[in-house]
Image: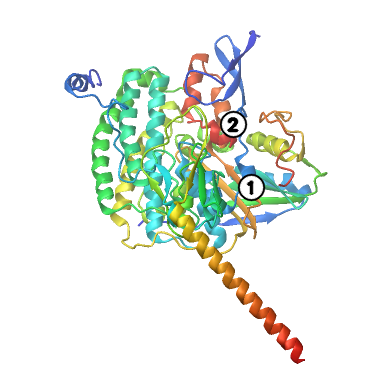
Amino acid sequence: MAVLKYASEAILNLFRPPVTTSYPAAPIEYPDGARGHIEITIDECIGCGMCVRCCPCGTLSVDRNAGTWSINRFDCIACGYCVEKCPKKCLHMIEGYQTPDAAKGEVTYTKSPEVLEAERKKREEAAAKAAAAKAAAVAKAAEKAAEN
Amino acid sequence: MAEVIHPLEVIEEIPAEGLLGKVMEKKNAGMRLSQACAVYNEGKYELSYSFADDTTYEYVTLRIVIDPETVIPSITDIVPQAVFYENEMKELFGVKIEMIRLDYQNKLYRIEKETPFKEEG
Amino acid sequence: MKKRSIIPFGPQHPVLPEPIHIDLVIEDETVVEAIPSVGFIHRGLEKLVEKRDFNQMAYVAERICGICSFQHGMGYCEAVEHIFGVEVPDRAKYLRTIWAELGRMHSHLLWLGLLADGFGYENLFYQCWRVREKVLDLQELTSGGRLIFSVNKVGGVIRDIPADQQRTILSTLDEVEQELYAIRDTFFEDYSVLSRLKGVGIITKEQAHDLGCAGPFARASGISTDMRKLGYAAYGDLDFEPITSNDGDSFARCYCRMQEVFQSIDLLRQAISKMPQDNELAVAVKGNPDGECFMRVEQPRGEAVYYVKANGKPNLVRMRVRTPTFANLPGLCEMLKNTQLADVGLLVLTIDPCVSCTER
């Protein structure tokens, strides 16, 4: 017979501490593998746009020339597909969940000026190299045409 | 080690006229209707009626391919639980099914667009 | 002839937060006919295949349902893998089994709690959900999500369960099992539970078969069918038998689900002890799928059918999910006939309806 089955439980509960925590006054404890939000080490990003193409909910955007990476955190479903696909492994899942807010908004990360400057120089060098190669090719073609 | 069942899973293509006869045959063989669905592909409807056997786990799918204008009979007189599947096909794809036992008159789902799954893109 | 009247039940009703509407035709207090209508929350997720490629659809499939989300993702991935003809690494199969069984445990405990709440046994409801919380913590520990795991991908899984987490699972399972014994005894022996469940809403074996019922609903009527016997994931290596009951009433459905929680604990122990020690979690899938496949998986609520049709493009032609509640709705309407109006709420609950996945 199941009479007073939970009597012992009820008496014990008088002396037990509460099961719940007083969040947000007490800090939240995340388990080891907690899936939180996406963070980027922006200086390592090469702006390839792989994360933008693979995101199932279209929350990311990348501007290669301006060196920015934006995320609308309220659209993000924290699936982690971009983290898996990133070729430079500069995206990470960091613990801590998105806090509520009155309005949706994008967060934009911009590369540091030094990195941007270095990238600009590299691009210029590459452009100069390409231009030189092109000029050489043109000259060679002209030479060939003259020979014929 | 548990025994793993590797059941027969086949897709039988049949003409639209033979549907009721085949459904009757499957029902008499003791199979239950597991699912029915429609696909709109390249201007044709592909309707699949899958029957499952609970003991042998056999899975037989009857497939009929029809033009959008073809009217097909409802199988609800033979298999009553097909009403939801047929109403779904009718509402989302616009498959012309006549004589459904409990016809929701395209009000199974409360959607704005008519036959949203029929167009592509 | 007695006077007939129609009482609308739902979409907002006291038993569970699922938007199902039923028109009950009643004579005095007895229901003579029930006409269900769903469709308040149709989201058109199947239509999304035109906008998302087959890899992204794995994450969409998971969001069909919040309770059996992992099993939805797994069913979809298994179907696409079947089309590709790839074999998932053994360890990934076992990991999928572990997550699927954790999901089954928490789903059944949720249902048992709701059932207790449905017949007014608040205390038992709290006990069930207190135990369920431990299972949810295990899920968060191993996958990072309490309900939506996002660990499946076409070709395998993306996370591993290391040895220390396996030990945590085993020790928590021991605690959960001890606590469940008391809950089981209450469900099986308590006078107030039995008086509400015994002999209410009977579906015979023939009716269940004719109406195409699936899952615990069919097993409670004596149909011994369990899609896990098909041996998807690692179920082929594990030892279990479907749990059935011959009564077909509400208590039988409660009995089946309660015993399945213990079966899941057993399966989890088997899976963890048999898990192979290799490091490979996924195989690379190259190209796009071409072909079609019907995949059946056993979800907590019953057999779910995934139909995937692809034509060699990144976007699938069709993804169709037949969820277990969709198959159980005709059985529900039959069951409601000749019952008392006061029992309707409880009886709707006993098929474990998940209307959100029904409408997708």
Work out whether C89 lies above or below A94.
Answer: below
| Quarter assignment of residue C236 | bottom left
Amino acid type at mark 1: Lys
Q: Position of residue B95 (x, y in %)?
A: 75, 41
Is there any visible trace of residue A7 in the rendered image? yes
Distance CA(mark 1)–CA(mark 2): 33 Å
Q: In the visual, does B109 lie left or right of C31? A: right
**What residue do we see at 35% from left, 37% from top?**
C136
Work out whether C239 lies above or below C46.
Answer: below
Work out whether A101 lies above or below C173.
Answer: above
Mark 1 chain: C
Task: Assign a secondary structure to mark 1.
Answer: loop
Q: Position of residue C225 (x, y in %)?
A: 47, 44
Q: Which residue is mark 2?
A: C330
Q: In the drawing, what numbered circle is on residue C51?
A: 1
**What residue do we see at 41% from left, 45% from top?**
C100
- The first of marks 1 and 2 along the sequence is 1
Q: In the drawing, what numbered circle is on residue A122?
A: none
